[in-house]
Each structure stands twice: as structure tokens, then as C-alpha cells.
Image: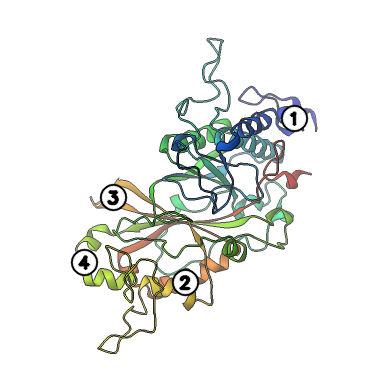
Amino acid sequence: MSSHESTETSDGVSRRRFFGAGATVSAAGALAVGAAGGALVANSLHAEPAPSEPISERRYAFYDAHQAGIATPPQDHLVFMSFDLTTQSATELQLVLAKWSAAMAQMCAGEPVGNVEPAREQAVPVDTGEAMGMGPQGLTLTLGFGPSLFDQRFGLAKFKPKLLKDLPAMAGESLDPAYVGGDLCIQACAYDPQVAYHAVRNLARMARTQVKTRWTVLGFGRASAGANQSTPRNLMGFKDGTRNITTPEDLQEHVWVEDSDQSWMDGGSYLVARKIHMLIETWDADYIADQHAVFGRNKTEGAPLTGKQEHDTPDFKATGTDGKPVIPADSHIALAAHENNGGTKILRRGYNFTDGIDSVGRLDAGLFFLSFQKDPQQFISLQSKLGASDRLNEYIRHVGSALFAVPRGLPEAGKYFGQEFFS
């Protein structure tokens, strides 16, 4: 590296420490993860923690073939942050990615990213400290690259996957520019909201001279189930995400990228983020039979209207005594079903959110929809169909939107996301 290597960062840590094979912080993180021993949960759909394990000590592997936070069971809380780069230096971008990768490993192991209480009175703490003693709390941190990262600023155009483009305009959108796009994103999920917030706060802090926060969403009450999890409810009171991807076979077929034009994406995925505002007051005034018809399910059990139990397979051909389909063809479940979309599936990790009240005093709340797929067209095709005729559109507005390329996982300490860009 050049003379830049010896330049001290704002954290007081040299660039050499991050780019070198030793990668001090990475190594510390690896040691912490390794020390977890049997408490460490593999990054797998079916790897459930031992029942006796305290939830505060639950942890997921950071170094793996795929990034955690995709196939790992959805945690209870989310902090999603989109960033714009303020630097136009490729070297400084490289530094950010190296620092973040090392710090992400350390925080996912439940460790601070530096001194919380320095010995020298005039020293500024490196870690902000609000997660001290709280344990890993199942923290996963997932990093993505937006299409704008590959513009002319950093000379990375040749590394841009051909599938990574801004999402097209779609029906049902009323996008707020304050919730659109970004050069980088971090999805932080944990069983405690403070641990998730601590993670993104410290990542933003350690890169404060290179990035600025573009938008953020705080999510609670996961709205999709993973394998071996019960199905949660959205803020409309319905179970959502019942027919989510839950098997390794479906992950391989629908989520993990293979044979990309960019090798760094093989084993990665594409992340779609959509902030969906619910017209809650309108929904709350709707009668129950119409609510059933909108979703195609009943409210209490979550069963399809042709079944009795939540996981009964919906029969979209069944008709009632009036000759009409029992599950309306324009219901949410019918339009989204893989049976009616050529087998297309996506992995959803949505969360509920509330931002208080809006400018006219209505509840400002809804669903922060997150999905992972091997090709963004999977989401585009489904949403184009839903946006055109979903009965749910009367009660929702898509106000935020972004697409990110999520690179494959890191194999070991000392490696960092985007390292291929700077070789």
C-alpha cells in the first residue's frame, strides 16, 4: 500500500491494521466468535439454538459462505440504515469497508469495537458503550452495495453486476425521495433493539468523515417467519409471511446467486427494501369479511379461505355456491402465490414500523418489507402484478424503495467486503 497506510484514522487505528493480513480488529472478532464454542449457532435455516440457551447469548456465525441475516431465523428487532458516501477517494472507501467488516465480526460476537472507557481522561471512547454487558443478542449485520456505488466516483463500474439497477417505477408507489436509494446499506437484526442500534451507530460513527446516513428505519415485531418459527402478524392483524422460503433447497433455487457476471456475487443475494405505509384508520373501519377477502385468509387462524389451518395449501380453483372463487383472484395470497407466478419465490424478512403520526394526525406506520432473491426480476415481476390489481392496494402506499447487491460471506478474519474491487 502507499503512504496512506500509515495514516491514523479517526478512531486512532492505522490503515495498515485493517488492510494487513493481521487485521487486528478482525482477528479479535474471530477469537471472540471462536471462543463461543458450543454457543455459536451455524448460519443455517435449520440450526436452532439449544432451548436452555439464554437469548442474550444467542449468536450467529459471521464468517460463512453467505452473509448472516438472510437465511438465519428473523430476530425480533431491526435497524436498517442506508448510507451515501461523502468521500470520492477509492482508498477511503476501501478503508471504510475494511473497518466495517472487522467491526461487524466483533459486534456480532458481542464484543465492543474498542475502548468504552479509555484510561486517558482526554481520550474519546471508541465504542459508545450502550450494548456493554447485553450479550450478542443474536445480532446479525448484513451489508449491501447500491447501484450508485458503481458510478464514476471510485472507478468500480467494471465490477457492477448487470442485474444491479435501480428498481423501475411500479403501480401503487408514492415514493418519498428521503427513503430511496443509497450507496451502502446495513441491515442490523437482533433480539434486543439497543444491540442492533448500537451496531449501526458505531459503524456510522467510525466512518463519519466518509459516509453520511441517507435514511433509516427502526423495525419491530418481525412480519415474516423463518424455519421453525411461528408466523407473526403485521399491523393489520393478519399473519404475514406464512408461505415463506424455509428450506435449503428453496434457498439454493431462489435466493443465492450462482454464476454471476461478477464472481464476488456468487453466494450473495439481491436485497429489496420497501417502506410501505399502511392507511391504518381506513383499514380499521373495514368489515371483517372484506378484510378476509383482501388477504384471502381468515384473521384469527391465518388459514386460507379454502382451509382450516394456517399452513393448509390454498385451493385457488375452489368455487363457492355462487360459482365465484372462494379465494378471490385479486386477493393478496392469490396474486403472490408461487403457483400463480410460474413457481417464483422470494425470501421475506419484513418488520413492522411506526413513526408516530403524520402531518395530518394519522398514524404513520406500516411494513418495512425486505426480501432476498437471486435476481431482482423475481421481486419486480411479483410486485408489478400486485401493484396492478392487489385488493390490498386500497390500504397501503409504497413510500420507500431501494435495491442492494449483498456480496457473499467472508471466509475468515482479515478479509473484507469489496476486497475484490481493490486487488
Residue labelled with disc 2 = 384
* Res. 210 visible in picture: no
Amino acid type, mark 3: Asp
Query: Distance of mark 4 from mark 2, alpha carbons?
Result: 25 Å
Q: Mark 2 or 3, which is nearer the eye?
A: 2
Q: Are marks 3 and 4 in contact (CB under 8 Å)?
A: no
Q: Residue 18's x, y, as percent?
A: 70, 31
**Left or right: 422 in relation to 135:** right
Q: Earlier in the sequence, mark 4 or mark 2?
A: 4
Determine the secondary structure under disc 2. Answer: helix
Q: Which residue appears at 41% of the width and 45% of the height?
A: 76
Q: Nearer the viewer, residue 45 or 417?
A: 45
Residue at the disc numbered 3: 358
Q: Disc 1 marks which amino acid?
A: Gly
Between the residue at mark 2 and the residue at mark 1, the CA separation in whole angstroms equals: 48 Å
Distance of mark 3 from mark 1, alpha carbons?
A: 50 Å
Q: Which tag is nearer the camera, tag 3 or tag 4?
A: 4
- The disc, 1 or 4, on the residue closer to the chain's N-terminal end is 1
Quadrant location, the C terminus: top right
Q: Name above or below for residue 109 compared with residue 65.
A: above
Label 1 crowd (10 A; few <14 / some 14-19 / many >=20): some
The residue that mark 4 highlights is 286
348 to 18, vertically: above or below: below
